[in-house]
Image (cartoon, rainbow, N blue to C red):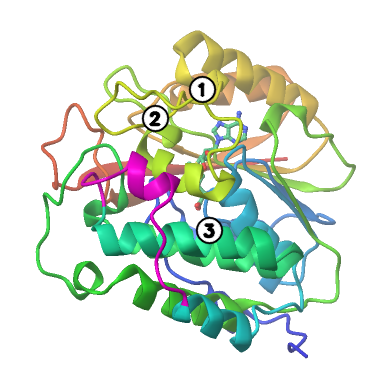
Amino acid sequence: MTPTVTSSNQIDLFPKTRYMGSKSKLLTAIEFASSRLTFDGVCDPFAGTGVVSYMYKALGSRVRTNDHMKMNSLASHALIENSEILLDEGSIENIVALSGTRGFISRTFEDIYFSEADNNFLDATRLYIDEELDGYAKSIAITALVRACVKKRPRGIFTYTGTRYNDGRRDLALSLRQHFVEQCSAINSAVFDNGLRSISYNTDALSLDAIDGELIYLDPPYFSEHSDNDYVRRYHFVEGLARNWEGLTLQAHTKTKKFRSYETPFSTRAGTYQAFEKIFSKYSKNPMLLSYSSNSLPSKTELENMLRNQGRTVEVTTTEHLYSFGTQNTVPSGQRNRVQEYLFIVT
Ligand SMILES: C[S@@+](CC[C@H](N)C(=O)[O-])C[C@H]1O[C@@H](n2cnc3c(N)ncnc32)[C@H](O)[C@@H]1O
């Protein structure tokens, strides 16, 4: 049995992972803003790692969490929707004992991201997961495998090939098998029950329904003319792994062997403006919190105007934030990017 908790200490158990735009360092500001609002349940349509959804679950809310990337929705399935199921020790031991197989991953991604031994481990484990696991246990295992790959990858992304940026860190020295065991343990320890029924979706954020009284936490990709905000391009390998590359169009001619990105309105300037208008009108009666940054479009004033035109009251708080991922075209690689992170409080 996992403990029933509604305590902020639980938040510290969320397994850490690197992800572009993660709000793990802004949770206090988000929690503080939420404490001033009245709501019943939380919806997080662009959940990414799920860390904000997890915080709300830990604070005692029912949560609807969503991301159009399968890897993120599985992580939320394992940690937010799931309240009690763990990946049992026997399954973890079986996976660790697997001898590697040379399958799709080893053949397609030879000498691209990981060693032959690591690729063989991925092939054997992915097969085992599909054949032997289901439900929340399967989501835990896939999430552990995804996070193992992100940990072992310098800078945590898959936009380049080879092992550039290897600074000798422990994370880069461990095998994927060792990382997998650590991640299983971290995820198992983070599963908890808050007594309410949460749910994880894997769909386009714009297709979710509005529910009266819910707090909507909005954290869409930040659009800028100077950088691309394509999550699928950065994480294609682990997103492919989560889906076992099923239904994806692999672009075999690319160096990184990425698949064709998903459609999202946030990839163009016009699409981004339209998406904000649609989202704001869909949730016109819900309290909302919106995370956005100072170097993105629409600007702070434009967003405030859109909301005020719908009769909403808006207050904006500002936090100085250092992102570990720069706007890739303007900031030299490896350098951090200082921006102002806005939190729009909309009532
Ligand atoms: C800024 S990140 C969210 C980060 C998250 N709050 C966290 O702390 O980890 C934006 C997320 O939106 C997702 N996304 C982009 N377009 C989407 C769409 N149309 N529907 C649902 N999710 C989308 C991306 O996959 C990405 O995970």
**Sequence-first disc among 2 and 1:** 2
Q: Note whether ligand 1 is within 8 Å of mark 1.
A: yes
Q: Position of residue 309 (x, y in %)?
A: 68, 17
Residue segment shown in magenta = 98-113
299 vs 85: above or below: above
- Judging by the rendered image, the residue that carries numbered circle 1 is 266
**Sequence-first disc among 2 and 3:** 3
Q: Position of residue 67 (x, y in %)?
A: 62, 42
User: Which residue sits at x=11%, y=49%?
Assistant: 164
Question: Label 1 to label 3, Cα distance in Å?
Answer: 31 Å
Report the amino acid beneath label 3: Arg
Q: In this image, 194 relative to 170: left or right?
A: right
- Label 1 with label 3: CB-CB less than 8 Å: no
**Disc 1 vs disc 3: which is toward the camera?**
3
Q: Position of residue 303 (x, y in %)?
A: 54, 24
Q: Is residue 333 visible?
A: yes
| Near-viewer residue (24 or 117) | 117
Report the amino acid beneath label 2: Asn
- Judging by the rendered image, the residue that carries numbered circle 2 is 229
Secondary structure under the numbered disc 2 in the rendered image = loop
Q: Residue furthest right?
A: 212
